[in-house]
């Protein structure tokens, strides 16, 4: 049961990360933002996590639960609003840092909650997700 809960969390985090990063990339298309390379790195990393978690879900015979439509639309609308108001690298970095920080805090809580209750591969994936989130937060700070 614990494997399922942590895997579902990782799946939804990676799915939402892929979705929002892709949406932000689309909104910045044609604009001269230096942050686009880090945005591409973030998308690549979420895609790697997504593929790994899908394999673990299949291995454990767990059906994935996708992030809700309303959560995706809300994120998309908030990003569009932010890009229209201020699409500077500093503003985009601030928005990304806030999102990654919320994710990192939640991932840290999940690791603490499930650390002794889940398979090592599941825990390693969660720890890898957390490490990636923290690393990107640090990289984005240079744009502030």
Image (cartoon, rainbow, N blue to C red):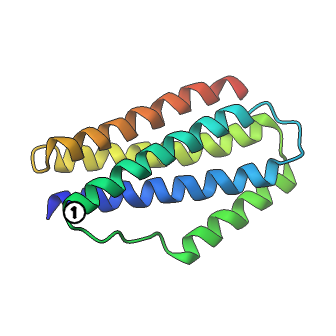
Question: Which quadrant is the N terminus positioned in?
Answer: bottom left
Task: Name the spot of residue 67 as percent of width and height, x first.
Answer: 47, 69
Dividing the picture into quadrants, the one containing residue 138 is top right
For label 1, the residue is 4
Q: Nearer the viewer, residue 137 or 19?
A: 19
Q: Is residue 97 left or right of residue 45?
A: right
Image position of 112 with respect to 15: above or below: above
3 relative position to 38: left or right: left
Q: Quadrant of residue 27?
A: bottom right
Q: Where is residue 7 shown, x and y percent of the image?
A: 28, 57
- Neighbourhood count class around disc 1 (C-alpha, 10 Å): few under 14, some 14–19, many 20 upward: some
**Residue 134 or residue 1, whichever sits in front:** 1
The residue at 39%/32% (across/down) is 131
The residue positioned 62% from the left and 43% from the top of the image is 96
Q: Residue furthest left?
A: 116
Q: Total label count?
A: 1
Q: Which residue is at the front of the view, 126 or 103?
A: 126
- Coordinates of residue 140 in the picture (x, y in percent): 63, 30
In which quadrant of the rendered view does residue 2 lie?
bottom left
Please tell me which residue is depicted at 54% across the width and 32% down the height of the picture: 136
Residue situated furthest top in the rendering: 142
Q: Nearer the viewer, residue 29 or 75?
A: 29
| Residue at image coords 56%, 53% | 18
Q: Is residue 5 above or below residue 114?
A: below
Which quadrant is the C terminus positioned in?
top right
The spot of residue 65 in percent (x, y) is 37, 71
* Left or right: residue 31 compared with residue 115: right
Q: Is residue 55 left or right of residue 79?
A: left
SS of the residue under disc 1: helix
């Amino acid at each position: 049961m614990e494997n399922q809960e942590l895997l579902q969390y990782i799946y939804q985090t990676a799915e939402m990360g892929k979705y929002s990063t892709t949406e932000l990339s689309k909104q910045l298309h044609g604009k001269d933002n230096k942050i686009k390379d880090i945005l591409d790195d973030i998308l690549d990393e979420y895609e790697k996590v997504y593929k790994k978690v899908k394999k673990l879900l299949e291995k454990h015979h767990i059906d994935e639960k996708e992030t809700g439509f309303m959560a995706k639309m809300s994120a998309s609308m908030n990003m569009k609003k932010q890009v229209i108001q201020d699409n500077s690298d500093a503003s985009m970095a601030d928005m990304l840092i806030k999102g990654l920080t919320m994710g990192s805090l939640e991932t840290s809580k999940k690791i603490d909650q499930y650390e002794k209750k889940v398979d090592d591969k599941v825990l390693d994936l969660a720890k890898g997700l957390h490490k990636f989130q923290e690393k990107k937060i640090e990289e984005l700070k240079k744009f502030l």
